[in-house]
Image: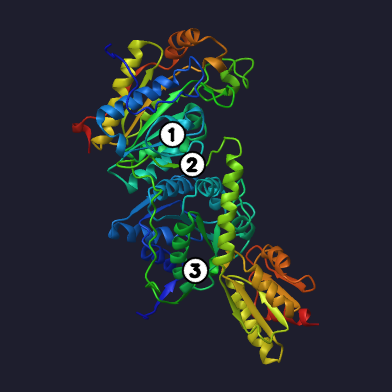
Amino acid sequence: MNMIFGRTKSLKDTPTHFCPGCTHGIAHRIVAEVLDELGVVDRTIGIPGVGCCVFMYHYFPIDVLEAPHGRAPACATGLKRVQPDKIVFAYQGDGDMAAIGTSEIIHAANRGENVTVIYVNNSVYGMTGGQMAPTTLLGQQTTTSPYGRDFKTEGYPIKMAELMATLEGVAYSSRVALNSPKNVLAAKRAVRKAFEMQIHEMGFSMVEMLSTCNTNWRVSPTEALDKIENEMIPYFPLGTFKERTGKDFL
Amino acid sequence: MNERTLTKGNIALAEGAIQAGCRFYFGYPITPQNDIPEYLARRLPKVGGTFIPAESEIASINMVMGAAASGARAMTSSSGPGISLMQEGFSYMAGSEIPGLVVNIMRCGPGLGGISPTQGDYNQAVHGGGHGDYRNIVLAPASVQEMFDLTILGFELADKYRMLSVILADAMVGQFQEPCRLTPEKPVEIIEKPWALTGCKGRKPHLVKSLYLGPGEQERHNLDLLAKYNLIRETEVRFEEKSLDDADLMIVAFGTPSRIAKSAIGIARAKGLKVGLLRPITLFPFPTRRIRERTERIKKVLVVEMNTGQMLGDVRLAAAPDAGIRFYGRPGGGIPYPDDIYGEILKAME
């Protein structure tokens, strides 16, 4: 029997803790495939933020530093400055990056730290039970926006990929979605591009991944995929917002 | 090499860090410690080091965490409000057993406070500040030379025990100038870090973390940390004693008040009063046993601090139960004169 699809080398052979239907496993798979393809697994250091991503060390066979909530980009700065020859990536959720960690992400990006950030946006605080995040869509009901997010009192969902693209230190900022085979393939191309930016010392790179949280959204896995398509993507458009080329690099 | 140069305390500390092999500094400006980052911003690039003017003290301590997790000697420095912001990082570094050096040139508080010399951060430094069950090594220099020497020792102890060393100094020690030997007294100890995160080529992956969710895991971790802290209590206590062997009264003071106390002791001795000094150099580990031993005989104790009484609690716990303990404190930037302390000596001797 020919094996035509299997576990990628850089994911450990272990069940994940992610809820059934969550697309977080796909995000992990994409990162692992890219590390494999680029041949950098044994010189990569990962820094998970706080949230569902924190157990990264259960799944990736790499060195891992567990960062305080929101501070992964600052920890990544310290690691990379000591070891510029290593591949350093932070892995943050939307609460971690877009709420408590806005200062650290913006300044790491603005300094042009040569690190990669994988940003999983599922529009809620997943691990703590689905509270409202800065990325929660208008009208979206969560445990702490039980009547739906209202822009008059809670403001608007924050668009990190676009925000990061305005900073000079950013080499690459892109938003992808994990809700369809086509989008997953595009997501992988973006993640590969982001790590290539780091390998070529182009500066800070980030990929925002629209991801499901069907448990806290209180919908089925397939309905969650549809929600990404019909509700998230219209507000959080997919695409590359900044891509530095060698020519642009000062 | 005994050549001594007239040096400011903060500069001696910064050069001590360089001599200790620290090549990574991250910090945010705050008075009265700005001489440290300003010196290192000039000095570090000349020795192949890295200086990052961080966006906040929260970022600073997390950069220290990342650099130190790589195995490098890394540091930050700040004062009151900045140190408060770093307490999250203190706790994570304690839990993850990441070594590092943090300098607190204290300013008055609470709140924005003032920039005069003070010692109001004793409790924060010695008894926690961040969440969880942890300790930091806390070193209290009282001279420019100690700013240099204790910074080197701080890095050595931090690496040896995989924990944070805090240099807790008042602004007087930070700002005044004294002759200082700017070379290490003995060869700087370099400690191997086989646990560091350097990429897993040719070995199993390393993990540096503080989250323990499995049954009993966190309790075991806390007890392991306790065993380490108890070992430090046994082996790393440092203090200075002066004129205690015949003393009827023992002053306990650290930092600048210990210097002023020495002048007061001079006045008292000239008048035939038998007064001596015990100066803790390590605030954690605290010289608990030594204070107990001394107070088995010396029944009068005067604690002098530039705060409203913080180390006082540790002295009370350490002293023999029948020792009489008085306190003289000047908070909020008040600095005692030798005569002030001499007046307190007279009251205590009554």
Q: Quadrant of residue B235?
A: bottom right
Q: Position of residue B237 (x, y in %)?
A: 57, 68
Q: Furthest residue to the front?
A: A1
- Compute the Cα span from label 2 to label 1: 10 Å
Asked whether the residues under the numbered discs 2 and 1 touch, taking CB atoms below 8 Å apart as contact, a structural biologist would say yes
Position of the N terminus of chain B, as image quadrant, is bottom left
Q: Position of residue B306 (x, y in %)?
A: 64, 67
Q: Amino acid at mark 1?
A: Tyr
Q: Residue at x 60, y 22 (%)?
A: A153
Secondary structure at numbered mark 2: loop
Depth order, front residue of B257/A218: A218
**Chain that bears disc 1:** A
- Check the image and report above or below for B247 versus A73: below
How dense is the environment of label 3, judged by Cα within 10 Å: few (below 14), some, or many (20 and up)? some
In the image, is B318 to the left or to the right of B84? right
Position of the C terminus of chain B, as image quadrant, is bottom right
Secondary structure at numbered mark 3: helix
Q: Residue at x 56, y 61 (%)?
A: B231
**Chain that bears disc 2:** B
Q: Nearer the viewer, mark 1 or mark 3?
A: 1
- Compute the Cα span from label 2 to label 3: 38 Å
- Check the image and report above or below for A171 versus B226: above
Q: Amino acid at mark 3?
A: Gln
Q: Which mark is residue B290?
A: none
How dense is the environment of label 1, judged by Cα within 10 Å: few (below 14), some, or many (20 and up)? many
> Which residue lies under the disc numbered 1?
A57
Query: How many numbered dots are placed on residues in this image?
Result: 3
